[in-house]
Image (cartoon, helix red, strand yellow):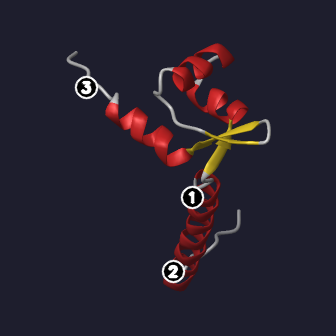
Amino acid sequence: MAATIITTEDLREFKKELLEDIKKLLDVKSTSASKQWLKSSEVRKLLGISSGTLQNYRINGSLSYTKIGGTLFYSHDDIEKILSQNKTNSTN
């Protein structure tokens, strides 16, 4: 059985490559999460709600929207703000 010798330089190179890969993954995640405007289907999927519930949020003013043509758009920032405002801490 042949032995492989790993040098300090090999470890440094591995560390450098690993950090670069992690940075790439974080950049991809942050760009996909930074989408400013979401369509109704994306909001329903994100929040796990039905079309009727989303309509109720629009009607009662819980969630603001912009209508262009026949398409409704929701601000990602508004959705995050609503989620933060309704956040509760578990007492368990």
Q: Secondary structure beneath disc 2?
A: helix
Which badge, 2 or 3, is on the more N-terminal residue? 2
Give the residue at mark 3.
89
Give the residue at mark 1.
30
Q: Quadrant of residue 72?
A: top right
Residue at 62% x, 60% y is: 31
Question: In this rendering, would 49 be left or right of 42?
Answer: left
Looking at the rendered image, the disc whose residue lies closer to the viewer, 2 or 3, is: 3
Under mark 2, the amino acid is Arg
Under mark 3, the amino acid is Asn
Residue at 36% x, 37% y is: 84
Looking at the rendered image, the disc whose residue lies closer to the viewer, 1 or 2, is: 1
Residue 82: percent from left, percent from top: 41, 34
Q: Quadrant of residue 29?
A: bottom right
Q: Nearer the viewer, residue 19 or 45?
A: 45
Which badge, 1 or 2, is on the more N-terminal residue? 2
Residue at 47% x, 42% y is: 78
Residue 86: percent from left, percent from top: 34, 28
Q: Quadrant of the N terminus?
A: bottom right
Give the residue at mark 2.
12
The Cα atoms of the two marked residues, 2 and 3, are separated by 43 Å
The Cα atoms of the two marked residues, 1 and 2, are separated by 27 Å
Residue at 58% x, 38% y is: 65
Q: Nearer the viewer, residue 90 or 38?
A: 38
Q: Is residue 25 above or below residue 72?
A: below
Q: Secondary structure beneath disc 1?
A: helix
Q: Is residue 73 above or below residue 51?
A: below
Circle on res. 46:
none
